[in-house]
Amino acid sequence: EEEEEEGAGAGQAAGQGPITDATQTNLVNLRRTIYLTIMSAMDFEEAGHKLMKIQIQPGQEIEYVTMIIECCSQERTYKRFFGLLAARFCMLKKEYMEHFMDCFEKQYAIIHRLETNKLRNVASLFAHLLAVDGISWEVLRCIRLTEEDTTSSSRIFIKYLFQELSATLGLVKLSERFNDPNCQEWFDGLFPKDTQANLRFAINFFTSIGLGGLTDRMRQYYKDMPRLLAERQAQLAAQQQQQRGNDSDTSSSSSDDSSSSDDSSSSSDSDSSSSSGSSSSDSDSSDSSDSDSEDDRRRRRSKQSSRRKR
């Protein structure tokens, strides 16, 4: 009987399925392992080699990216070790590059939560990835450099980011990248051209951080901006006037069609009335001819009767 009860208990346990750990103990252990591996490595090549030996589940690649950024932000000063390690992962798989790009946007969205030291380290890390083309410069789309769309923390982040890019690439190469016609749509937020105030704010910002050489083309555009805005307004006014003219033409054509239909209906009414008038006149003439013939008959009869009496 005891053996049967044990067999029944085992069957019930097997029927319940695998046990799910809701405390995420395995994830915490994985992050601890990644952290210890990074911090104990002598150089970035050793760290990358050891990290790739860790067995991870599909979809856990983001943990590498998150821990690299977190370890970098915890340092007192920025260490180039983390930039080289991040660039190595970006070159290994496209998934890591995409994760770093997503983390850039997320970090910029919550940059106001970071301290100045962490902010500088994170900005230097992403500047290194941009300089070596570890991630696409398309990530700069999320930045809109205006007084209303930025905070003091985000402006500090942008300052450290571009100062590190200038130190790594040089001002000439950085300016060439900004003036690349294939990448202009990525930098529209850095130099907004919707209003003069926003463009002036961006020019003054880059000049104040020592990167005024990036604003030469924008300064010329700023001088021509009143004329360009006037031409744009004139084009809009012309388009609106043309649209109004088209609307008036369509309304007049519709009114002409309605009037022509009214004329045709009135002409048809007049034709019907004339036809009715002619028919009535014909009927009157026929009635008069009938009455004349009856009078003649009466006269003839009276003459015949008078002759008979004689």
Image: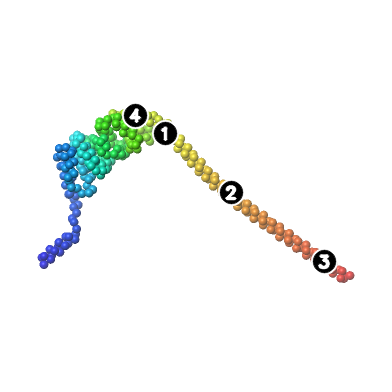
Question: The disc labelled 3 sits on which kind of residue?
Answer: Arg
- Circle 2 is placed at which residue position? 260
Mark 2 and mark 3: Cα distance apart in space: 60 Å
Work out whether mark 3 precedes mark 4 in sequence or the reverse, and give the earlier one. Answer: 4
Residue drawn where x is 25% and y is 31% of the image: 167
Residue drawn where x is 19% and y is 61% of the image: 15
Work out whether mark 2 precedes mark 3 in sequence or the reverse, and give the earlier one. Answer: 2
In the image, 199: left or right of 115?
Answer: right
Residue drawn where x is 17% and y is 45% of the image: 53
* Circle 2/circle 4 CB separation < 8 Å: no
Please rate how many residues cluster around mark 3, counting C-alpha atoms within 10 Å: few if below 14, some from 14 to 19, many from 20.
few
* Circle 1/circle 4 CB separation < 8 Å: no
Q: Which mark is residue 229?
A: 1
Work out whether mark 1 precedes mark 4 in sequence or the reverse, and give the earlier one. Answer: 4
Please rate how many residues cluster around mark 1, counting C-alpha atoms within 10 Å: few if below 14, some from 14 to 19, many from 20.
some
Q: Where does the image place residue 17, in percent across and percent down from the top left? A: 19, 58
Question: The disc labelled 1 sits on which kind of residue?
Answer: Leu
Please rate how many residues cluster around mark 4, counting C-alpha atoms within 10 Å: few if below 14, some from 14 to 19, many from 20.
few
Identity of the residue furthest to the left in this view: 2
The quadrant the C terminus occupies is: bottom right
Q: Secondary structure at mark 4?
A: helix
Q: Where does the image place residue 64, in percent across and percent down from the top left? A: 21, 43
